[in-house]
Amino acid sequence: GLPSRVTIWEVGPRDGLQNEKSIVPVDLKLEFLDRLGEAGLSVLEATSFVSPKWIPQLADAEELLGKLSRRPGVRYPVLVPNERGLQRALAAGCPDIAIFASATETFAERNLNSSLDKQFEMFTPVVTGARDAGVNVRGYLSMCFGDPWEGPVRYDQVVAVGKRLLELGCWQLSLGDTIGVATAGQVEGLLAAFADAGIGPERLAVHFHDTYGQALTNTLTALRFGVSTVDSSAGGLGGCPYAESATGNLATEDLLWTLEGLGVETGVNLDELVATSAWFAEKLGRPSPSRVVNALAG
Ligand code: HMG
Ligand code: MG
């Protein structure tokens, strides 16, 4: 069966904007966040405390969080790769952070200048320090299905790295199809492999990019498996600048259309969200790739 309620983890302001060619002015980011909260999204991944040399698009993280008016009941998680990032997140008063690991050797090098093993030396003090400060840590795992340099990724390899993230102290593990190549059979296979390792769907979230148009099918497959947190981005913004052939995330509107049809609750107002994505696409100067946004935005 399907969960009766799904938590949408909105990643547009982070995953979307990290991949924009232009740098979006901080006031426009703030208005985007405000409108997303107004539409009823309860988790807004706001920005990243990464190296500004690596992701100049999010170099304004301090200014953004300093000016942000946090809505009651809304969480604003941020990405943190290392201790420097944790210090910045703590100084900004963030109660929710996420570390982001790679399931493959090559992407650990490309995205973190690290390796499959060495990334954990970077994450361990982050998780320890965060938990000492009462901060929740989510764990992302990238390249769970396919890697542009290494090809298909074995389930046991993904499970092994994912298990390390949970054992380190992450409260949830988000399984990333960074380049959008996964198919539904692989989603079933990976979730079954996690279940065999004692990690059930209540600890997991899914994070699909839509490169091959499979993100919604893959998400539905995961929901039928009991997963009830789904990452998506308003208007389908997104991608990862350090992964070849990564395009936008599953569009939040496409997800909502399906969930509403199935009677699954999210607390999000589709019309308000569509209006926000249409407005933001105009500001960015290019149409949203979301089919639902285009169908509904008059
Ligand atoms: P490095 O170059 O090996 O690190 O990068 P470094 O320690 O040599 O630092 C380089 C410079 O950055 C130094 O400055 C540091 O001080 C500074 P300099 O001395 O040259 O002036 N620096 C920082 N500044 C601010 N905040 C920090 C920070 N750290 C270092 N936290 C590093 C290593 C991990 C820093 C780098 O590789 C990095 O920032 N990577 C992040 C890449 C990224 O953000 N990728 C996108 C997010 S992941 C994603 O999108 C996937 C996901 O959506 C799931 C999925 O789809 O699969 C989550
Ligand atoms: Mg992503």
Image: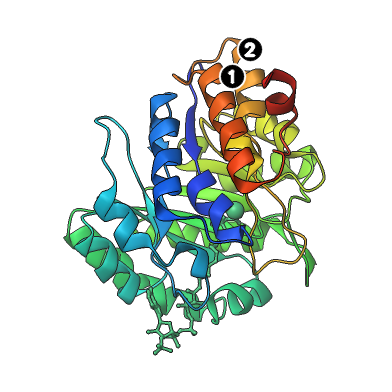
Counting other residues with Cα less than 10 Å from the Cα at mark 2, is it few (<14), some (14-19), or many (20 or more)?
A: few
- Residue type of the residue flagged with mark 1: Leu
Is 193 in front, or is 51? 51
Image: 73 above or below 132: above
Measured as percent of width and height from the top left, residue 268 is found at 47, 21
In the shown orientation, is residue 56 left or right of residue 92?
A: right
Q: Nearer the viewer, mark 2 or mark 1?
A: 2
In the shown orientation, is residue 108 left or right of residue 8?
A: right
Return the residue at label 2. Answer: 262
**Residue occupying the point 69% across, 31% down:** 221
Among the 4 quarters of the image, the one containing residue 178: bottom right
Q: Is mark 1 within 8 Å of ligand 2?
A: no
In the shown orientation, is residue 180 left or right of residue 79?
A: right
Task: Note whether residue 223 is visible.
Answer: yes
| Cβ atoms under marks 2 and 1 closer than 8 Å | yes
Measured as percent of width and height from the top left, residue 120 is found at 44, 74
Measured as percent of width and height from the top left, residue 186 is found at 76, 45
Return the residue at label 1. Answer: 2
Query: Residues under labels 2 and 1: Cα distance?
Result: 9 Å
- Residue type of the residue flagged with mark 2: Leu
Image: 204 above or below 83: above
Q: Is mark 2 within 8 Å of ligand 2?
A: no
Is 194 in front, or is 114? 114
**Residue occupying the point 55% across, 82% down:** 113
Is 29 in front, or is 209? 29
Q: In the rendered image, which quarter contains the C terminus?
A: top right
Measured as percent of width and height from the top left, residue 297 is found at 67, 22
